[in-house]
Amino acid sequence: MSLERTLTIIKPDGVEQGNVGDIIQIFEKNQFKIRAAKMLHLTGAAAGGFYAVHRERPFYSDLVRYMSSGPVLVLVLEAENAVSRLRDLMGATDPKKASEGTIRKRFATSIEKNVIHGSDSEENAKTEIGYFFNALELV
Ligand code: CMP
């Protein structure tokens, strides 16, 4: 077991539908500690930079438009095995394929509007945390 940090984003659909409180409660009930949080309305450039790894994918421009369509809540979570445990709690990218009880199964409406992002590796978590937070903003 190792204490890890991961980056999560409650996406525009989650904020707009009023699911922020429920999702944070899921984090806390599952022993994740919140180490940083900020609400942002991403520009297209900021959303595009964050998802640059997907820029060749057919869904990239729609994804950037969606992620900059309204406010998001960006958080750093800390827990034992935070990266994989958060991804288990989130469920599959496509909510139709997500297991019962997962965040995406409960709250997401489509493969694009899938309510939450979570880092997919510890290395990417470090990069993604650095994209949104400086050292002074991490507790
Ligand atoms: P996320 O886990 O944040 O990582 C990339 C995002 O791209 C993903 O969640 C979805 O919001 C979106 N995405 C992934 N695959 C598709 C797809 N096939 N069609 C549309 N959007 C997608």
Image: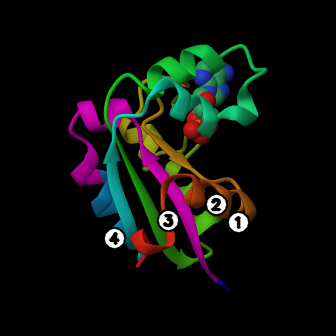
Residue 125 shows which numbered tag? Answer: 2
In this view of the protein, can residue 132 be seen by the observer? yes
SS at mark 4 in the image: helix
Decide: few, some or many residues near mark 1? Use Cα within 10 Å; few <14, some 14-19, many ≥20: some
Whether 114 is drawn above or below 8: the answer is above
In the image, the segment drawn in magenta is 3-22
Instruction: Tell me the residue at 70%/33% (across/down).
Output: 52
Q: Is residue 87 magenta?
A: no
How far is disc 1 from disc 2 in space, using C-alphas? 5 Å
Q: Which residue corresponds to mark 1? A: 122
Q: Which residue corresponds to mark 3? A: 134
Q: Earlier in the sequence, mark 3 or mark 2?
A: 2
Instruction: Tell me the residue at 52%/77% (across/down).
Output: 79
Decide: few, some or many residues near mark 3? Use Cα within 10 Å; few <14, some 14-19, many ≥20: few
Q: Nearer the viewer, mark 3 or mark 2?
A: 3
Q: Which residue corresponds to mark 4? A: 28
Q: Earlier in the sequence, mark 4 or mark 1?
A: 4
SS at mark 1 in the image: helix
